[in-house]
Image (spheres, helix red, strand yellow):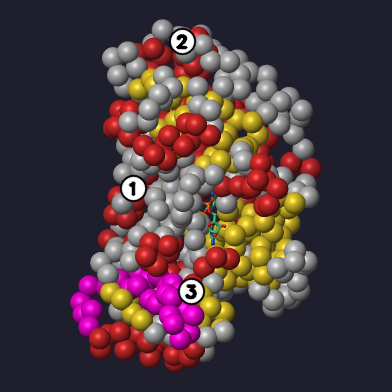
């Protein structure tokens, strides 16, 4: 794609922000927060002041790493952009991370300084020997220091392939893994999915729940709107009601969130005026048909499913409009290629389940060499996902590679059983995992959250089991059904299956 050729010297913020101000668009709304709204000129002024603080007050030099902690708010957005603009490397962290995980990140990413919102100070301060911290709102903090710097800040003359972001995988298990991204990658994600699949425009208002520390949110709520001169709404504490109310209030046109959030919002839709809403993007985990259908019935909007990954920065397979096929995630986003590989790494044809591999303008550079060796081959990124294609090149999600349930010799994808269960009127949320079993190796076990008005009884369990048996091959039915009030999920909306298996 010609649009993806970027100059050798490139600072992404010059393109995302300064360019709009220089072209007379400084008065347009860039960021809407819970308490303030900033135009492009306002945002650029904040970014420039923070960049001065980083370079002058903190004595940081290009290439230094700055860890960022904050809920989704305008200051957090400005801080990330300032780090890019100053030629430094942003290391955004998920708000709910604990001291142990933060310690690993500080260490692995060799962090030189921290910008942190006060409410998130506690866990950080428990990290032994943490780097110097500047708090957003303290008396001696970032905002106070910003007041002393009123000169414009010229973007540091970085190369297109200088690292500007170290994104840690949200990971459903274990230790966070760092992935490195360049200035040109930041623009490349803006010029792929939002341009070709979403059709983003200057008059769009982007809104959603994913944290800016999650690349799904960083792209969808900050980078994508800025690229086209549009506005992004940042909500500090996104809850289903709050998101719906904010869509109404700010007349949002594009929403980014995870399937579980759409399910929670579906029932509440009639209470809000959502006429402004045009596009709803779902990512983070598989989008069940029942969720897509219920949302369409409630809002009239056909959801845009898209699979993305921290390793590749954003969405690389998706479909919108007439290209949507029920059950499929979609086709590779223009700029990306995807294929399915067997256990020996050889490509397989349509109808065969295998491992998804992806190649594109953004591609993975892990911080750790051993992961690079095992998961990135010849520019192809091996994902942890089992997928299958059809004859027309559409990609169908089956399961996480390590979540396939093997019961009495059958391979069973938990997601398929979940999809059926979610069609039952009693089921609000569910997670299906394999539980060790002497006779069958594993049995299919369903963890179910019931909708209000349904009883967690053995009879209900039988009804659900029969429902599954009637819809898909009977050997896939959940031999065990466990009722619960809440499923364990990451901050990004991903089901933590390992916790279900341990429960
Ligand atoms: C799973 C999906 C089925 C899949 C992400 C959009 O989720 C993001 O990044 P992570 O690194 O996780 C990646 C893994 O999540 N997944 C994501 N989307 C889908 N599975 N259907 C989907 N639509 O297992 C993938 O390997 O946390 C998503 C944009 C940026 C992102 N970082």
Q: Front-most of 330 and 488?
A: 488
**Mark 2 to mark 3: distance in Å?**
52 Å
Q: Is residue 336 visible?
A: no
Image spot of residue 499 (x, y percent): 38, 62
> In the image, what residue occupies the spot 41% across and 82% down?
478
Q: Which residue is mark 3?
A: 414
Image spot of residue 88 (x, y percent): 57, 23
What range is drawn magenta here? 428-457
Q: Nearer the viewer, mark 3 or mark 1?
A: 3
Query: Is the C-beta of the residue carrying label 1 under 8 Å from the nearest atom of ligand 1?
Result: no
Q: Which residue is mark 2?
A: 57
Q: Secondary structure at mark 3?
A: helix
Q: Is residue 274 visible?
A: yes
> In the image, what residue occupies the spot 49% across and 16% down?
54
Quadrant for the C terminus, please: bottom left
Mark 2 touching mark 3, by CB under 8 A? Answer: no
Q: Secondary structure at mark 2?
A: helix
């Amino acid at each position: 794609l010609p649009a993806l050729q970027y100059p050798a010297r490139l600072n992404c913020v010059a393109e995302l922000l300064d360019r709009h101000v220089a072209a007379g668009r400084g008065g347009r709304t860039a960021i809407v927060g819970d308490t303030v709204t900033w135009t492009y000129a306002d945002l650029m002024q904040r970014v420039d002041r923070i960049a001065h603080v980083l370079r002058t007050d903190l004595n940081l030099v290009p290439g230094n790493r700055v860890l960022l902690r904050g809920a989704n708010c305008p200051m957090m957005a400005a801080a990330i952009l300032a780090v890019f603009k100053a030629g430094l490397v942003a290391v955004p962290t998920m708000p709910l991370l604990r001291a142990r995980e933060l310690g690993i990140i500080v260490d692995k990413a060799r962090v030189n300084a921290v910008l942190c919102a006060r409410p998130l100070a506690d866990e950080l301060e428990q990290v032994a020997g943490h780097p110097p911290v500047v708090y957003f709102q303290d008396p001696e903090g970032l905002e106070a220091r910003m007041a002393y710097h009123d000169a414009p800040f010229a973007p540091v003359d970085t190369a297109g392939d200088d690292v500007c972001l170290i994104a840690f995988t949200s990971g459903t298990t274990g230790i966070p893994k760092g992935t490195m991204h360049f200035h040109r990658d930041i623009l490349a994600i803006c010029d792929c999915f939002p341009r070709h699949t979403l059709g983003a425009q200057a008059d769009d208002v982007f809104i959603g729940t994913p944290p800016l520390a999650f690349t799904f949110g960083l792209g969808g709520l900050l980078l994508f709107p800025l690229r086209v001169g549009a506005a992004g709404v940042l909500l500090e504490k996104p809850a289903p009601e709050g998101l719906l109310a904010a869509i109404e209030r700010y007349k949002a046109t594009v929403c980014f969130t995870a399937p579980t959030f759409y399910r929670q919002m579906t029932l509440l839709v009639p209470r809000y005026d959502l006429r402004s809403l045009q596009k709803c993007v779902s990512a983070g985990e598989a989008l069940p048909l029942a969720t897509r259908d219920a949302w369409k019935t409630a809002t009239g909007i056909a959801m845009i499913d898209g699979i993305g990954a921290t390793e590749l920065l954003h969405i690389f397979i998706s479909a919108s409009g007439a290209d949507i096929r029920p059950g499929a995630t979609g086709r590779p986003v223009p700029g990306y290629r995807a294929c399915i590989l067997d256990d020996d790494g050889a490509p397989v044809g349509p109808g065969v389940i295998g491992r998804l591999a992806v190649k594109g303008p953004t591609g993975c550079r892990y911080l750790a060499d051993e992961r690079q060796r095992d998961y990135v081959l010849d520019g192809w990124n091996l994902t942890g996902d089992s997928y299958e294609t059809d004859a027309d090149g559409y990609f169908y999600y089956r399961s996480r590679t390590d979540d396939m349930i093997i019961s009495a010799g059958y391979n069973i994808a938990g997601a398929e059983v979940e999809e059926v269960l979610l069609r039952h009127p009693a089921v609000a949320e569910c997670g299906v995992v394999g539980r060790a079993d002497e006779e069958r190796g594993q049995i299919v076990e369903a963890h179910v959250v019931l909708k209000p008005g349904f009883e967690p009884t053995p009879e209900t369990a039988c009804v659900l089991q029969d429902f599954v048996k009637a819809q898909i091959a009977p050997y896939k039915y959940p031999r065990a059904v466990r009722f619960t009030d809440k499923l364990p999920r990451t901050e990004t909306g991903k089901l933590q299956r390992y916790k279900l298996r341990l429960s």
